[in-house]
Image: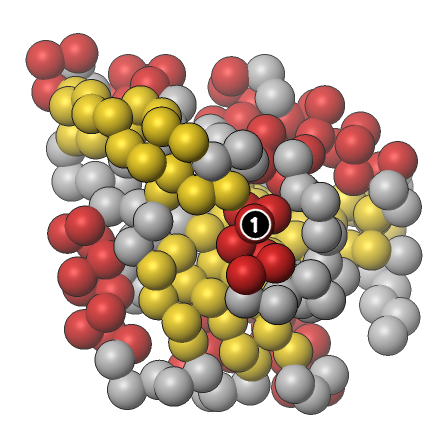
Amino acid sequence: MTITLSDKGNQKEIKKSDLDKFFSFYCKLKKNTKGIVVGAHNGNWGHWTQPILDKDTKCIIIEGSKPQFDNLTENYKEYNNCTLLNEVVTVDGGDIEWHTGGDGYTDSVIKQVNQRFLKDEEITTEIRKSISINKLIEEYNYQGYDWLHTDIEGYDAEFIMGLKYLPKFIIFENEHSKFIGTYEPCINHLKNLNYEIIEYGIDTLAIKQ
């Protein structure tokens, strides 16, 4: 499947609403797609939600925080095209520090992200077991998955660079990765793997060419 995107000067741009349309169009056009969502929160929003609600794709939806996962489960309990996992997912797996606070929007393995918005006394840190994304992909036989959507509060870039199995396209939040300095290495990594990069605001779309 070939996807072409227009250039505006040297800066490739895509409107956020168009990003939603792109995701839905891709899943409707290419039948039997499957993907992975990491950092779903409660599932009330995200570029990935409409194709799943339309049952145009199968997916694994992962959320590390228990309160958000409980709401996610309630919201998606009738969708048999989804596998829901309450797990912290990292590149290597193993025990990690999990930082939470506030309303849970910045729950992350990256404490710097929490510290951007919360005082240290508002942040709770605990040791959590994490599972390796590459082992999870193998366990669920998702090696040939089509798409990945991540919103994991600053861990996105490191996570993507650690993937053994890469999909046709990736959508990820870039704001916190830029803040901690991992964004540009990730972009260079993806370009070396022949991905085209389209950035809009806090979102980045990478499409395999």
Q: Which residue is mark 1?
A: 135
Q: Is residue 74 left or right of residue 51?
A: left
Decide if residue 39 is on the left or right side of residue 42: right
Q: 106 or 62, which lies in front?
A: 62
Amino acid at circle 1:
Lys
At 20% from the left edge and 25% from the top edge, which residue is drawn? Answer: 126
Q: Is residue 95 visible?
A: yes
- Locate the C terminus by quadrant: bottom right
- Residue 91 vs 64, above or below: the answer is above
Q: Is residue 56 above or below residue 15?
A: below
Q: Position of residue 155 (x, y in %)?
A: 49, 31
Quarter location, residue 31 = bottom right
Number of numbered tags placed on the structure image:
1
Q: Is residue 1 above or below residue 16?
A: below
**Is residue 113 visible to the viewer in this orientation of the structure?**
no
Give the vertical position of 191 relative to 15 (above or below).
Answer: above
Q: Residue at x 86, y 74 (%)?
A: 1
Q: Residue at x 27, y 40 (%)?
A: 105
Coloring scheme of the render? secondary structure
Q: Position of residue 33 (x, y in %)?
A: 65, 78
Residue 82 locus on image (x, y percent): 42, 76
Report whether 43 appears left or right of 131.
Answer: left
Q: Tag 1's secondary structure?
A: helix
Residue at the left extreme? 121
112 sits to left or right of 199: left
Give the camera-side residue of 106 and 124.
Answer: 124
Q: Name the residue at 66% across, 42% down.
A: 163
